[in-house]
Amino acid sequence: MARLDVQITMTDGTCPATLHVPDGRGSWPGVILFPDAGGARETMRTMADRLAGMGYVVLLPDVYYREADWPPFDMASVFADPDERARLMGFVGTLTRDRIVSDTGAYLDYLLARPEVSGTAVGTTGYCMGGRISLIAAGAHPEKIAAAASFHGGGLAVDDNPESPHLAAGRITATVYVAAAEDDPSFTPDQARLLEQALTAAGVRHTLEFYPALHGFAVPDNPTHDPSAEDRHWKALKELYGAALPG
């Protein structure tokens, strides 16, 4: 498996990213991995490596590229430190829906143009904040996303938010998989019902389920990481991409 440092030309500058390529010769389906609020870091790169080992070319972008050379967050302590929490939430707040749509368009164009990538559509997966980005991308770029996953994503269906991902359900053509955490205030049972209704009404092929774990269960450097839930998430991704992405 190869891990390549790459640069993507964006509307607002240049986005550093890593490209994770399976061993061997040939081409493989592409996947974009959207990080949680901690951004691109070694834990996320290791997760992208694992996806590459499953037979996918994985792009992990620095979604905070507008912040330039930002110091990485320590996910074990960031929420206990008021200054670091404020810095992290400030970064999250810069990712408006318009910026997400523009940025994901550039990521998709870059990935689909790579010689290592087969097909005309890719998969996405995202964690926490990245889970919301994954669904926004699926609604904004339906012709280029065939499978979209969200793990412990928040704000996926907020009734009074005009930027809520569920409002674009009618444009999604991807197969969608949403795995929520139990007792997660960022994605409540009411949100789940609203998202389920929107996806069903739009005829979107989807699965929405709650894991018996805390928010952050799939990401190893999160204090709430749950190994059993993480394993379940890898199995779900394998099944989703195996069915929805070209071989």
Image (cartoon, rainbow, N blue to C red):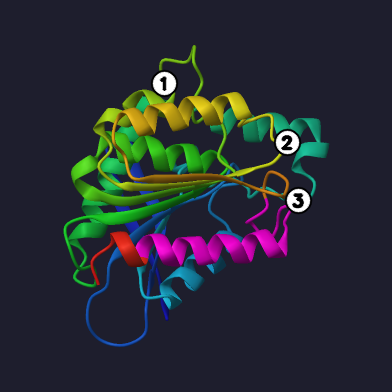
Q: Residue at x 18, y 44 (%)?
A: 143
- Ranked by sequence position, the earlier of labels 2 and 1 is 1
For label 1, the SS is: loop
Residue picked out by circle 1? 163
Residue 168 position within the rendered picture, expressed as x and y whole percent measured from the top left:
32, 27
Residue 22 position within the rendered picture, expressed as x and y whole percent measured from the top left:
37, 79
Q: Is residue 155 visible?
A: no
In the depicted view, which residue is nearer to us: 86 or 46? 46
Residue 10 position within the rendered picture, expressed as x and y whole percent measured from the top left:
29, 42
- Ranked by sequence position, the earlier of labels 1 and 3 is 1
Q: Residue at x 44, y 77 (%)?
A: 53
Residue picked out by circle 3? 224
Work out which quarter of the rendered image holds the C terminus and state it: bottom left
Mark 2 Cα-neighbour bin, 10 Å: few <14, some 14–19, many ≥20? some
Q: Amino acid at mark 3?
A: Thr
In the depicted view, which residue is nearer to us: 70 or 1? 1
What residue occupies the far top of the structure in this picture? 160
Residues in magenta?
A: 217-241
Residue picked out by circle 2? 183
Left or right of residue 33, residue 190 in this image: right
Q: In whole angstroms, how far apart are the C-alphas of marks 1 and 3?
A: 28 Å
Left or right of residue 194, residue 180 in this image: right
Q: Amino acid at mark 2?
A: Asp
Q: Is residue 154 visible?
A: yes
For label 3, the SS is: loop
Mark 3 Cα-neighbour bin, 10 Å: few <14, some 14–19, many ≥20? some
| Foreground tag (2 vs 3) | 2
